Image (cartoon, grey):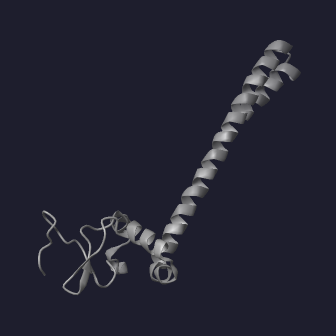
């Protein structure tokens, strides 16, 4: 668009190929298009920063879950538990389990190779399949 604006100025100033009113009309139109394009670029950069912030925060939470849990208030612990285990945790036969695996672990499995030791934290058994509100005995 800036190149088109340069060509417009060239046509008006150096070659006298267009009249002043056409030049002003076209320049105003190009200035608006350039401003809109710059806004779109700025919006895209803001979105990129927001996405990177979310990724960085998620990475921090997953890398420091134990510490966050130990330092959190009751409300913080409940929120962390809900984020990681949206369907809750169950305690059965001296072990914790989940009715289903949290989507975050599925997403992580797509980006972490099996050789990196990805898996559920020790003591978490997943999934426990329940039917009609009753879980099978282990």
* Quarter of image, res 10: top right
Q: Is residue 71 left or right of residue 131?
A: right
Q: Is residue 114 left or right of residue 33?
A: left
Residue at 44 percent of width and 71 percent of height: 80
Q: Is residue 18 shown to the viewer in this render?
A: no
Residue furthest to the bottom: 94
| Residue 40, percent from left and from top | 63, 41
Relative depth, front residue between 52 and 100 = 100
Q: Is residue 25 left or right of residue 133?
A: right
| Residue 14, percent from left and from top | 87, 22
| Residue 96, percent from left and from top | 27, 80
Residue furthest to the front: 74
Which quarter of the rendering shows the N terminus? top right
Relative depth, front residue between 88 and 113 = 88
Q: How many numbered marks does the figure carry?
A: 0
Q: Is residue 37 above or below residue 100?
A: above
| Residue 17, percent from left and from top | 81, 14
* Quarter of image, res 11: top right
Which quarter of the rendering shows the C terminus? bottom left
Residue at 38 percent of width and 65 percent of height: 104
Residue at 34 percent of width and 63 percent of height: 103
Q: Is residue 133 shown to the viewer in this render?
A: yes
Residue at 77 percent of width and 24 percent of height: 28
């Amino acid at each position: 668009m800036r190149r088109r604006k340069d060509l417009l100025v060239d046509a008006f100033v150096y070659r006298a190929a267009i009249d002043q009113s056409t030049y002003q009309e076209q320049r105003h139109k190009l200035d608006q298009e350039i401003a809109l394009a710059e806004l779109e670029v700025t919006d895209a950069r803001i979105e990129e920063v927001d996405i990177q912030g979310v990724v960085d925060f998620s990475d921090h939470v997953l890398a420091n879950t134990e510490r966050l849990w130990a330092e959190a208030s009751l409300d913080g612990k409940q929120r962390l538990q809900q984020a990681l285990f949206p369907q809750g945790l169950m305690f059965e036969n001296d072990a914790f389990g989940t009715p289903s695996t949290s989507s975050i672990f599925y997403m992580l499995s797509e980006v972490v190779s099996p050789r990196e030791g990805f898996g559920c934290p020790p003591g978490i058994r997943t999934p426990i399949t329940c039917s009609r509100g009753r879980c099978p005995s282990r």
